[in-house]
């Protein structure tokens, strides 16, 4: 039997609140984001918001967990399901990252963490635990596997992983902070493709 409409609506509320919070955090940052505005965009009262989240930091954790972190899990499942040469994986993985960044404000969230981690260290811990550590572990695992096959030269897989993702993170931060100040726009997809070719030239045996 179908559930009553009000029950389905109640179950949807945390997701709708998180979607509204993601918009507000991306636009205004963490410190300037107001729970009243988040509640208004989600179509609920501030009191209703507190039924699901105890404070703004708890809401930020939920946003990262439910809107950003799942993309890392999706990529992990995709690469673990195939057995392709390392170069082919990288040439698919980096443009995929650029594609995700076009639909999910990863750059805005990273900017929030970098800019406000001194005053809100829990934000950095949340982002590291749910996103950064998972992404680096995924890429380092791929590199270690490729090293065992003789595809990638010897070296610290974790440092190689940082080498792979570093320029893309810089591109995201450039787009979020420097383009609005007059910096020349960066084509993140082109950056991903060009960087894949450049970094593979140094990594592959």
Image: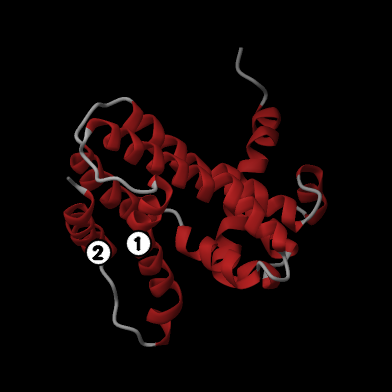
For disc 1, the neighbor class at 10 Å (few under 14, some 14 to 19, many from 20) is many
* Circles 1 and 2 in contact, beta carbons < 8 Å: yes
Horizontal side, residue 180 vs residue 27: left or right: left
Q: 34 and 112: which one is in front?
A: 112
Judging depth in this view, the residue of 15 and 126 nearest the camera is: 126
Residue 150 location (% of width, % of height): 21, 35
The N terminus, quarter of image = top right
**Camera-nearest residue between 69 and 22:** 69
Left or right: residue 123 versus residue 177 is right
| Residue 191 position in % (x across, y down) | 24, 64
Residue 3 showing in the rendered view: yes
Residue at image x 61%, y 42%? 15
Place residue 120 in its image quadrant: bottom right
What's the mark number on residue 197?
none
Between the C-alphas of marks 1 and 2, the distance is 7 Å
The x, y position of residue 170, in whole percent, is 39, 68
Image quadrant where residue 21 sits: bottom right
Residue indicated by mark 1:
168
Which residue is denoted by mark 2 in the rendering?
191
Q: Residue at x 43, y 48 (%)?
A: 158
From where the camera sits, is residue 102 visible? no
Extreme-front residue of the structure: 154
């Amino acid at each position: 039997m179908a559930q009553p409409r009000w029950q389905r609506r109640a179950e949807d509320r945390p997701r709708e609140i998180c979607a509204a919070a993601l918009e507000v955090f991306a636009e205004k940052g963490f410190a300037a984001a107001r729970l009243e505005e988040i509640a208004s965009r989600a179509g609920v009262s501030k009191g209703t918001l507190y039924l699901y989240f105890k404070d703004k930091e708890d809401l930020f954790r939920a946003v990262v967990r439910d809107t950003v972190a799942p993309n890392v899990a999706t990529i992990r499942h995709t690469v673990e399901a195939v057995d392709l040469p390392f170069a082919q994986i990288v040439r698919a993985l980096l443009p995929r990252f650029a594609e995700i960044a076009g639909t999910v404000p990863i750059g805005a969230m990273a900017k929030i963490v970098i800019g406000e981690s001194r005053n809100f260290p829990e934000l950095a811990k949340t982002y590291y635990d749910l996103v950064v550590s998972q992404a680096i572990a995924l890429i380092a695992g791929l590199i270690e596997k490729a090293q065992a096959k003789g595809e990638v030269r010897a070296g610290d897989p974790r440092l190689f992983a940082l080498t792979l993702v570093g320029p893309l993170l810089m591109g995201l931060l450039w787009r979020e902070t420097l383009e609005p100040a007059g910096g020349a726009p960066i084509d993140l997809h082109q950056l991903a493709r060009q960087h894949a070719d450049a970094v593979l030239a140094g990594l592959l045996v």
